[in-house]
Amino acid sequence: MKQYSTLKKLSEKLGLSVSTVSRALKDHPDISPATKKRVKELAELMEYEPNNDAIRLRTNKSKLLGVIVPHIQNLFYEHFLASLEEEASKMGYSVLILQSGEKNVEKESKNLDIMKRNRVDGLFVSVTEQTEDIKPFLKLTEMGIPLIFFDRVPPAETFNKICFADNNAATIAATQLIKHKKKHVLGLFWGSPKLSITQKRFTSFEEAFKNNSPETILDIHFHMDVNEAENITRKAIESNNPPDAIFCTGDSTMISAIRAIQKKGLKIPGDIGVIAISNGFIPELYTPSISYVETSGHKLAKLAYTRLMEIFDGKTFTRELSVDAVFVEGGSL
Amino acid sequence: MKQYSTLKKLSEKLGLSVSTVSRALKDHPDISPATKKRVKELAELMEYEPNNDAIRLRTNKSKLLGVIVPHIQNLFYEHFLASLEEEASKMGYSVLILQSGEKNVEKESKNLDIMKRNRVDGLFVSVTEQTEDIKPFLKLTEMGIPLIFFDRVPPAETFNKICFADNNAATIAATQLIKHKKKHVLGLFWGSPKLSITQKRFTSFEEAFKNNSPETILDIHFHMDVNEAENITRKAIESNNPPDAIFCTGDSTMISAIRAIQKKGLKIPGDIGVIAISNGFIPELYTPSISYVETSGHKLAKLAYTRLMEIFDGKTFTRELSVDAVFVEGGSL
DNA sequence: GTGAAAGCGCTAACAA
DNA sequence: TTGTTAGCGCTTTCAC
């Protein structure tokens, strides 16, 4: 079994010192072209690959970015991760991804430790539904590890946050529902009402109706289980006073709601309207495609990455940034 | 800005040697209970987190597993990655994920270098469509780095591979099509015919018809672009001699084909049948849901991980394992 | 039961 | 232009 080449092995073969070899390999101006050539040729031949662990230990820069998400297996995070990895790799960063699960604060805090052990240069976190204690996160920032929350962020104001302009997204949805003269809307809000994202969405959704269509009946439900959404929808459409539209804050909720609608044999939009918050992939699978307010994981990732680079450049004040949502007309209202 | 604690700092505060502290922290039997207690308490207080870089450098074990995929943003890989990370984390492994893109052999080989630099303990790879040169991969195994190809694997026999029993999957699909007496099947094969997975699927699909329904007309297309699938389908269903069923080897192909069908106003299964190879998420969104041959990223990940652990335990011979596909009846045939 | 010392592979200040 | 040296944080052998 062949071993990894090291600077020492190269230097012995070449009759040079380790430091000369090291410098030659990184084109240090002090080294003569001839030496550089010799060194690089042998390095190629011996398939030298620098040992990142040693470099990190020595330089105290890991070139590692961490991401902690509830689940990888989620279209939104998938897009976020794909874009983030793509951006990061351009600058020589690698991305360490850890998932915490939805109701697992303990795992989240273990993941935080793993990130510390790996001495990540920066960290992106989307919190669990149960996350309340922000002290562990504060410790990170105290240690000067840049931390950026995205999408699901804690309410505290002392952090960098990148979110969708959620009031915006929910307001847009409400505006569309009002425009289509919906008078009885079932609102399915995915996630715990504790999360700031859920709160904001709810408040601005309600607000929009209060101001522009106070006569509309709002039937709001918070749920944290996909099956619940299907049940709630089923009960609503089977009741004496069924809704004429449904608003869903996420893909899985929408899928469940539509399943209930289709099982009942109702037509969209003829019998009932549907609008969702989504990145658009799932809504466009339906015919007619579901109208949605777009929230793109790609955009969020780009913004989050850019913000991190700013922090690396010394702009360390905390900021809360948001990406505007856009309405995409389908045929479901 | 607070610094990370180190063994040295702890040892100084405690008036002990670094080695004693190190041993106390890992419950070495030589150390007295009293000392252990003192050490652990201070470590807690000072928020000591071991430096993984130093440990790796010293022990030559990275506790890092690498995965190289064409894209993260793909339901199949997403499921694979989610399961793999979940399994790996149980045993203290972290997972480094890199994406190569579809037509980017260069990026793939760069990713391979990054994995080497990070001295990953083991590596999972699903290759690019363009990957032909297997030398870079051979080098890894020569160095004793366990390498397991999954899903998209190169034809060479000298590797560990974990695949779906693809002949199986395609055969199952063919059997169902024959059972439903389809006489003119449009076969949409995603991916280059160069890939062993595509080859196998095609061969066994054709074979099944040859043996059991030779009169069925097969109209087979290989494509590497989603829009192509929609175009091919459109042309086929608008022709004088339209197919009575479509077989798709993947989700995106299926989505495109169905889009063409729906735009034309045809009904599934009334006017045309559809069957696909998929993990089931997308097929079940349709009404009626699309019949599919299930290929689960979860199962594959579990098997791949188990195989890697076997290799770590010394069972280093190369093996080709496969997961059986299962038919899931929808209402689309 | 504890300590001293070497060394993993690399970088960088200083010397020559 | 190149070499010497120290040290990043940790584990581990050997000594006491």
Image (cartoon, coloured by chain):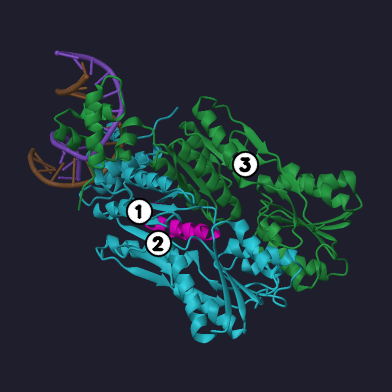
Chain colours: A cyan, B green, C brown, D purple
Q: Hey, what amino acid is under mark 2?
A: Val
Q: Hey, what amino acid is under mark 3?
A: Lys
- Position of A6 with respect to A205 (left or right) is left
Does A312 lie within the magenta span?
no
**Residue nearest the observer in this picture, B107 or A333:** A333
Secondary structure at numbered mark 3: helix
Do tags 3 and 1 sit on the same chain? Answer: no
Mark closer to the chain start, 2 or 1:
1
Q: Quadrant of residue D10?
A: top left
Q: Image point 22% across, 26% down: which residue? A: B35
Query: Taking the image as drawn, is residue B127 in sight?
Result: no
**Residue nearest the observer in this picture, B147 or A106:** A106
Do tags 3 and 2 sit on the same chain? Answer: no
Q: Position of residue B308 (x, y in %)?
A: 53, 33
Q: Which mark is residue B120?
A: none
- Which residues lie in the magenta part? A75-94
- CA distance for labels 3 and 1: 35 Å
Q: Position of residue B103 (x, y in %)?
A: 56, 56
Q: Are marks 2 and 1 in contact (CB under 8 Å)?
A: no
Numbered-mark total = 3
**Looking at the picture, does residue A104 appear above or below residue B302?**
below
Tag in front: 2 or 1: 1
**Looking at the picture, does residue A209 appear above or below residue B55?**
below
- Position of A69 with respect to B55 (left or right) is right
- CA distance for labels 2 and 1: 12 Å
Q: Position of residue A287 (x, y in %)?
A: 71, 71
Q: Quadrant of residue B47?
A: top left
* Circle 1 crowding by C-alpha within 10 Å: few under 14, some 14–19, many from 20: few
Say which residue label 1 marks.
A133
Q: Are marks 3 and 2 in contact (CB under 8 Å)?
A: no
Q: Quadrant of residue A306?
A: bottom left
